[in-house]
Amino acid sequence: MGADHARKLARVVSGAELAAVTDFDARVAGAVAGEFGARVHADGVELIDDPAVDAVVIATRDDTHADLVLAALRAGKPVMCEKPLAPTADRCREVVAAQAALKIPVDLVTVGFMRRFDPPYIALREQVRSGELGAPLIAHCVSRTVHTYPGGDSASSITQSAIHELDIVPWLLDSPIVEVSWQHGRSSVNSAGRQDPQFYLMRTASDVLVTVELFLNARYGYDTRCEVVMEAGTSALTLPTHIVTDVERRRAVAYPEDWIPRYSDAYRIELQEWIDSIAKGRPSTLATAHDGLRASLVADALVESMRTNGSWVKVPD
Amino acid sequence: MGADHARKLARVVSGAELAAVTDFDARVAGAVAGEFGARVHADGVELIDDPAVDAVVIATRDDTHADLVLAALRAGKPVMCEKPLAPTADRCREVVAAQAALKIPVDLVTVGFMRRFDPPYIALREQVRSGELGAPLIAHCVSRTVHTYPGGDSASSITQSAIHELDIVPWLLDSPIVEVSWQHGRSSVNSAGRQDPQFYLMRTASDVLVTVELFLNARYGYDTRCEVVMEAGTSALTLPTHIVTDVERRRAVAYPEDWIPRYSDAYRIELQEWIDSIAKGRPSTLATAHDGLRASLVADALVESMRTNGSWVKVPD
Amino acid sequence: MGADHARKLARVVSGAELAAVTDFDARVAGAVAGEFGARVHADGVELIDDPAVDAVVIATRDDTHADLVLAALRAGKPVMCEKPLAPTADRCREVVAAQAALKIPVDLVTVGFMRRFDPPYIALREQVRSGELGAPLIAHCVSRTVHTYPGGDSASSITQSAIHELDIVPWLLDSPIVEVSWQHGRSSVNSAGRQDPQFYLMRTASDVLVTVELFLNARYGYDTRCEVVMEAGTSALTLPTHIVTDVERRRAVAYPEDWIPRYSDAYRIELQEWIDSIAKGRPSTLATAHDGLRASLVADALVESMRTNGSWVKVPD
Amino acid sequence: MGADHARKLARVVSGAELAAVTDFDARVAGAVAGEFGARVHADGVELIDDPAVDAVVIATRDDTHADLVLAALRAGKPVMCEKPLAPTADRCREVVAAQAALKIPVDLVTVGFMRRFDPPYIALREQVRSGELGAPLIAHCVSRTVHTYPGGDSASSITQSAIHELDIVPWLLDSPIVEVSWQHGRSSVNSAGRQDPQFYLMRTASDVLVTVELFLNARYGYDTRCEVVMEAGTSALTLPTHIVTDVERRRAVAYPEDWIPRYSDAYRIELQEWIDSIAKGRPSTLATAHDGLRASLVADALVESMRTNGSWVKVPD
């Protein structure tokens, strides 16, 4: 992910230059730096303190996010942190507090919830907000990937993968999630010890019931679905396609393999908005530290529901 | 519905003749009888006892179903009863018992769960049963209609409308529903005192989690959706369409207004199968009295869950 | 085809009984007759003259059609002849003349252009005739099959396969075809000596330009497409589907293998309409002998264009 | 179009700055320049000669293109000219000759056939070139817009609008167009003296038959379609969509109003490729002056066919 951001900043984002990179694998850092003429730092803190660095993107291991964001805040530099802001709500709160303590008009911290910049999600949100079809009543999200990566468990499915739904749903419906319930049935033979698929019920402050199917070993493709059912009709994301091919008795369109092609535009537009906001000293439309905290609080509530047999769990403010 | 069945039996089902009709509105009965040269009876029991009547279709008010079915059993005539077999599981049990007491090799009672004869549902079931995509893990049903009819309440949404899903899901997944939970969020401004939409979680004996959205005031169209997620892929009903029209900046296909055009083929094929089975004295593939009872038991469990704040309720055997 | 018609008449068409069958292969005739309790005749003329036969369906080799239709006319029996009415326009004219010579109010001869009873084509025609989108300006037809059968040539592609388009286009646009031009490019490696694909330009009396791609070795599936472009928008047939399946990085719907599943409903509805019209002594909405002649005249004009290097050829009245 | 290019170069293309603008309407030039901090020139030649200008984009009236491109060549500056390179093939040849006379390894002239950078067209080309479905046999293009602009005629429909198909088809099929025929039927009531729709038959050197429907007053939306039929299957552009909306008995996706939203990505990617190629001194993958000439030669052949009653006209080398 870091290499992809580096490439986009160096090559397709207007107004940005890639000054420096670092990576726990020095060869990776060297290769990326060499390709774009950037310098290499030994670690994130060194990079953040480099005077040639005006702003920082963090795409490291989840458990290093909060410390690096805090370092950027200390250095007074804009920082975009890949989701999650931190693996626990407590550490997210620390970041929110540090940002608040600066008492500056424009936040330095932003969180990379790139779906907010995905043109299909934006179109869906505009349709909902237009009011043309009346108030939303119920919404259905599906998030499927081809396979899991080694090392996770049922809780990390929530905090690392479902976290995107936990951010995008309130953004889409303009109302926070206040209550959640975790559900499950049969698990895939490929689930390697996790519960997969998982199913969530969530309720917004506006009393919209939201359902989420998360299935990480869905095998067939990377597939994000979302439908918002309103009073007078319903609106849903389509599968983005370029071509349709007819062969061997079937008419078919292709699924992406993973999130990188699916959200390539979203990442580019997000980075451009971030760079533009920095250049102009204005707030960006990226997710804030507070948004990152909110998503973590919902994730924690889902984990608690999972551990209490699917009970409804309230999300703290 | 009765008039539609009468017309199909008289005009498009091979091997059937419309001998007699009855209706609580004598003018309606007279009009249908006149159109097809059938005789008119004062009530259902008189019609059942007419020697010219070899087999009986019941499409009357729900609370009259069981008594008429029992009358047909007494007369020893094959009877197809529109769903539900009876408004309560107890009355369904009475019919099942009366059928069993006859100790005959071929059931006389069948229930009009016509979706079992819908070509899209049949194709979906064949895909699931082929095993090509592995075992089913989770399934999603959506059942939306344009508007409710006066006089119902939240419970009748389950027993009269959702009942179709309660029959079709076990048929589709080849496993009975053993446990259910009733959920809800915001209700439509058009819901007239009911909870609408409603949302159900159901679990089959094979541990497949099944979700159902029932939304009777969906306004936009009559829409039945069903997706079965299996180990290696997913399969879903498509919206049946004949033409696509491009006008005024949009590409659009049409939704049916109600179930009659949507399930027209299913009704015809069901009636043909019923007539053929009678002609040959063989069991039909229509739903049995026992299937009607099973669906009512699941409906009752959902009503109980509704009255106990969404608790999981077991379905009795 | 004959066996399929026999089965439909015996089993799913209301008001019909299968009285007798014949086939050049006596075993086939015997098998079908045995299945449905019909008698077997040595040949078509014997069958036509059987007093137990009220009406006749002809689904024999193309070059036998006209003689059998004439025999049915002599016997004064309603006859439905599979397309084409005859392989040449001259023989079609003979049938038209024989029908006219009877001077009876209701034609005995009908031609099995079943697409006129296909619900998608009917919906498209209703959209065009509604005038909602203004007058038709241009129309595009595509007719593709999986492979050719041995023994045909470029001309028989027109007279046996494209003939369906030649009948359906005037019916759809409510205007006869008056002029045609035959075109071609590269031929498929599978074309076995024919020109395949072929491409036609046709003009209706109402000056609509109609294009037709006929590709018999398209391999991927049986696919009939038709789009009518009108002043304010465009309307087209959709691919009839029941389910959509997501597997191996693709979302796919199925093509039929050939015309039998694609037009199964059309054949059934056509036969029902034919039987109903006979029972009531009223004209049917099936294609007439004159329609069969018109299609043959257009086919002959296309063959002439093919032999004159794609020149525009007028269709005689 | 010019303002859109200026905005993209200033805001979303990496490595570009907007140095100067000009426009025949000085207020437009002033507004754009003000927005992005660029300077304003009195005319194109003055802008081209500005030492602060490293490269030039031309999006002026068609008949000024060639002169401005020649001025850029004289100034030795890279120039991207919107299509067409010139309204006549003769003037295109002049530009090709001027480029050739420079005897430099990297062309300065590029032509803005942006569809070559449209992700759907690129995916279609990759499918064709992969050879997976065998050789292309026939291809169908449809190019529809909402309405015409005042002042054109049937010939300018070809040279200004259809020109995109005339460039993209050889690029897609990897073979030049060698022969064309212009056809027509009924014209739209909105056609204001033009023939609209028009229909073209074209043949490539590889003997693929290509059909093109151009309909500028299609009213319903901006719609570019392209299907390539190959030996084993067919592949086609899909309508790019973000959301699907169900309301008022229909399921609908939106058409763009014109080419700017439809090809927004293509324009951005094209400009980025152009800037990158200039920065690195390497040839770009944009269309060359020779490509611009080829398209004009095909357009001229179509105009000649139009004036000779649809005869097949050869395209000169």
Image (cartoon, coloured by chain):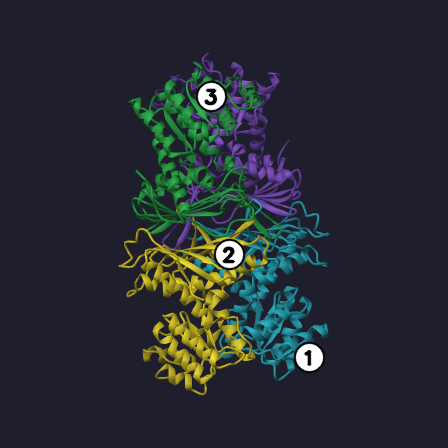
Chain colours: A yellow, B green, C purple, D cyan
Q: Position of residue B128 (x, y in %)?
A: 34, 44
Where's residue A137, x and y in %? Answer: 51, 52
| Residue D205 tag number | 2
Identity, as a three-letter code, of the amino acid under mark 3 = Gly
Q: Is residue D144 left or right of residue B296?
A: right
Residue C140 shows in the view: no
Task: Answer above or below: position of B154 versus D53.
Answer: above
Residue C61 lies in what quarter of the image?
top left
The Cα–Cα distance between marks 2 and 3, rounded to whole angstroms, is: 77 Å
CA–CA distance between discs 1 and 3? 92 Å
Could you classify mark 2 by the number of other residues whose Cα lies within 10 Å: few (under 14), some (14-19), or many (20 or more)? some
Instruction: State the residue in front, B256 or B92.
Output: B92
Quick one: label 1, few (<14), some, or many (20+) residues within 10 Å?
Answer: some
Left or right placement of residue B5 versus residue A21 in this view: right
The mark found on residue B84 in the picture is none
Q: Chain of mark 1?
A: D
| First of labels 2, 1 by sequence position | 1
Q: Nearer the viewer, residue C5 or B169?
A: B169
Residue positioned 36% across, 70% down in the render: A87
Q: Residue furthest bottom?
A: A51
Please tell me if label 2 and label 1 are on a single chain: yes
Say the numbered circle drawn on residue D41: 1
Q: Which chain letter goes with mark 3?
A: B
Reading the image, the residue beneath label 3 is: B44
| Amino acid on which disc 1 is placed | His
| Quadrant placement of the N terminus of chain A | bottom left
Q: Secondary structure at mark 2?
A: loop
Q: In terms of secondary structure, where does tag 3 sit? A: helix
The answer to whether residue D203 is seen in the rendering is yes
Residue D104 locus on image (x, y percent)? 53, 78
Q: Nearer the viewer, residue C244 or B196?
A: B196
